[in-house]
Image (cartoon, rainbow, N blue to C red):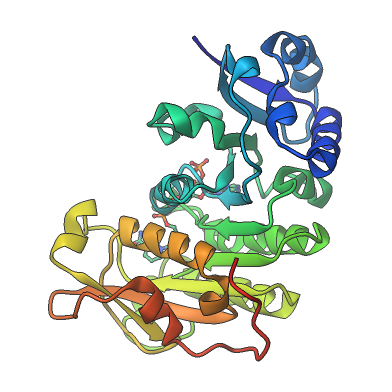
Amino acid sequence: MDTIVSLSPQMLRQRQGHQSTASSSSSAWAITTARIGRHLSTASSCSSPRLLIKQRATAASAPAQKEKEVVFVAGATGRVGSRAVRELMKLGFRVRAAVRNAQRATSLVQKEKEQQLLELVECDLEKEPQEGIVSAIGNASLVVCSIGASEKEILDVTGPYRIDYMATSKLVQAATAAKQVEHFILVTSLGTNKIGFPAFLLNLFWGVLFWKRRAEEALIASGIPYTIIRPGGMERPTDAYKETHNLVLAPEDTYVGGQVSNLQVAELIGCMATNRSAAYCKTVEAVAEITAPLLPMEQLLSAIPSKREQRPADR
Ligand SMILES: NC(=O)c1ccc[n+]([C@@H]2O[C@H](COP(=O)([O-])OP(=O)(O)OC[C@H]3O[C@@H](n4cnc5c(N)ncnc54)[C@H](OP(=O)(O)O)[C@@H]3O)[C@@H](O)[C@H]2O)c1
């Protein structure tokens, strides 16, 4: 039977300290359900983020795992974010998926082996103080942010300012404070730095592109190696879109329109996670076209110019 267990921030810190010194992650994962169960009541009375680990009751006896790189994904319940979580796990990353409501994250684990790669962290980026977000990021060396104000709350004038700018900037600040974060991938939107049509139309959603641009600027100014993805429209394309439309990447401020699927953007995030050097300090616009040639994503990514000189070696 599956259990969702929850750790208090104090346990979270102990666990992170333990992980950083342990030669293998197996001992960290081997916290028994019974031990964690005793701490549940402490955790539930605490306002800081709770680490929720979905694991099988038998996880204590699971075979030892090789230490894998951890990726923190904000917006993990979203259309792009949930697909990115699955892509990253497919690539073998461990994922700390930040969610506001764990119930919405149940579909993230689709295969049994993924249960050991996924940790759910409850973290509302608007409400959480910076130290709480730093705790939530934990030992992640890569941060992916695909949060956004919901179009369902279209009447909320402050949505894009609060979520697309303020909450994203808070995550950037926390990633900077977390020290071990080596790279930050941010999903914004095509037209983010444009004026006129059709950016003007999108900006009718309470200046959403204006606020996304402010978030991009905050990330670039942070000094963390970054990649900004500006996707085209993702509302209509289904996951099957890539079978008929090939991905096209372009430098910033190239496109005024175009479409791409959530899955293609998620796959691009996976490609960037494994090719940090090719993704280093770039702003990439992503659309998909019927007439475009089918090229490896790494090749498309490498063709985009970087904004900074020094690149790290690929992992
Ligand atoms: N849809 C398009 O056509 C399109 C086109 C270009 C760019 N984009 C941009 O691409 C990004 C991803 O889009 P999407 O369609 O995947 O978005 P989505 O499905 O609406 O998901 C948004 C995510 O943000 C999370 N979120 C919102 N407020 C939060 C907060 N305060 N703290 C933590 N998480 C919060 C949501 O969590 P909950 O589940 O808890 O609400 C959800 O996981 C967004 O920035 C969007 O604006 C979208």
| Visible residue check, residue 4 | yes
Q: Residue at x 46, y 71 (%)?
A: 229
Q: How many marks?
A: 0
Q: Residue at x 57, y 77 (%)?
A: 277
Comparing 48 with 281, the one in front is 281
Q: Is residue 30 above or below residue 191?
A: above
Q: Is residue 244 left or right of residue 65?
A: left
Estimate the x, y position of residue 122 in percent, counting from the top left. Answer: 64, 35
Q: Residue at x 32, y 81 (%)?
A: 198
Q: Where, quadrant-wise, is the C terminus in this rendering?
A: bottom right
Q: Is residue 230 above or below residue 119?
A: below
Q: Is residue 111 above or below residue 279?
A: above
Q: Is residue 17 above or below residue 83?
A: above
Estimate the x, y position of residue 25 in percent, counting from the top left. Answer: 70, 36
Q: Residue at x 61, y 71 (%)?
A: 215
Comparing 283 with 305, the one in front is 305
The answer to which image quadrant residue 120 occupies is top right
| Visible residue check, residue 200 | no
The answer to which image quadrant residue 289 occupies is bottom left
Estimate the x, y position of residue 45 in percent, counting from the top left. Answer: 79, 20
Estimate the x, y position of residue 269 in percent, counting from the top left. Answer: 46, 62
The answer to which image quadrant residue 179 occupies is bottom right
Q: Is residue 122 left or right of residue 45?
A: left
